[in-house]
Amino acid sequence: MFFLETAIILFIGAFLLTYLTIPKIIGVVEYKRLMDDPNSRSSHKNKTPTLGGISFFYTLVFALFFIKDRAEHLEFIYLIPGLTILFIVGLKDDMVVLSPGSKLIAQILAISFVLVNDSFGIESLNGFLNIYEIPYYLYLAIGGFLMLTIINSYNLIDGIDGLASIVGIVIMIIYTTIFYLAQEYFFALTAITMNACLMAFFGFNVSSNKKIFMGDTGSLIVGFIISILTLKFLALEPEAYGDGELPFLLENAPLIAISILIVPLFDTARVFAIRIANKKGPFSPDRNHVHHVLIDFWGLSHKQASFIIGCFNIIFVILFIILGSKAKNTGMVIMLVSVVMFLAYIFFKYNYNFTTLKQKILLRRKIESLKGKKEEHRPKKKKTKD
């Protein structure tokens, strides 16, 4: 009962703090002209305020202060330095574009504060693929790679209105449920706080007259929180929490984690593969993301594309949780690989057709434009009487 009361108060407080302060951020950004200018890759056409992620930072810091007593190993102390580093880097990147290398160094520094905390240590995969023991140095390598991948994957899906918010909300709801059932209340409350921030921000992100983007300031912070929750989820042990409280076997936790993060992970892997195949850098900008394909090729609106991707994420997670309650690892791995290969085939196919289609559309528009100009300049024939 105490958790429920705390969760409700925390959610309402975080939601109101974010909702009431974002308009102030919009006002300052517009006054200082820190707007995001659209370019050839942008999905928006007008200058739009950014830096919405500033509200995430101070809301999380306030929340961590009030829920610190729920942390069994003082995890909150290790989170604040990482949050601060990514906040500063994201803020600077939104105002003065930073190189991928500079951001990567900052991310490594931020996650190092988390990895040194023993409560996040992954000592075993609980029998997943018959892996029962993980050396400490291997945990550091796996944990570091995992956190960096999640942070950058989430950052890359922030390309259209509402998508990053919806995907983040879905992920936070799932992790809130998992950590509540595992009685890890500190992490459940952290997920609730982040969820409240995203829900409050979502209304502004899809608004037509008070629009704001979360920017790298926000996406790096949200990605950092998601990576922390994922690392803690993989660190759960049956001896401490038991499989009975969770709706799936803990030995299937790695596959459940992949299903929760399927949208950013699949999109990032697909885009990187396309860029490398086209002999470009993996971080070179383009419009080959899944959400761009849905908008450019299928003609969907931002809200429709975001809603479809969010629903897919929910369905995918529910399916794997059901399978994870009984199925063995091998069957789930086969199914996961099959689904990913099917999705990859569909969206790779659209990518190759999309380039040709776009060229044809542009060519047709140019021809129509030239025809229109020709018709305007053509002299009109005078009518003659019979």
Image (spheres, rainbow, N blue to C red):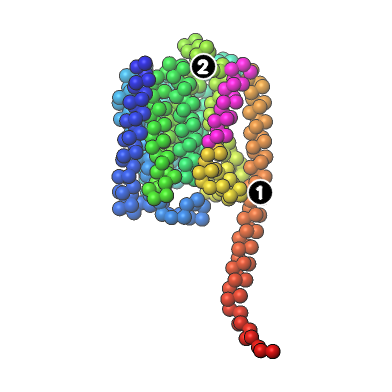
Q: Where 317 sits versus 153, above or below?
A: above
Q: Residue 172 carries which label?
A: none
* Residue under numbered circle 1: 352
What's the magenta bit mostly, secondary-structure-wise?
helix
Residue 88 visible in the snapshot: no
Based on the picture, tell me whether residue 74 belongs to the magenta stretch: no
Q: In which quarter of the image is residue 191?
A: top left
Which of 11 and 366 lies nearest the eye of the viewer? 11
Q: Magenta residues?
A: 310-327
* Residue under numbered circle 2: 246
Q: Which amino acid does label 1 sit on?
A: Tyr
* Residue at the extreme front: 386
Q: What percent of the width, then of the height, locates residue 53?
A: 38, 40
Question: Looking at the rendering, in which quadrant would you find the C terminus?
Answer: bottom right
Residue at left 61%, top 21%?
323
Q: What percent of the width, then of the height, locates residue 232?
A: 46, 22
Q: Which of disc 2 and disc 1 is earlier in sequence?
A: 2
Residue at left 55%, top 34%?
311
Q: What residue type is labelled 2?
A: Leu
Residue contact at pointers 1 and 2, CB within 8 angstroms: no
Which of 329 and 166 lies nearest the eye of the viewer? 166
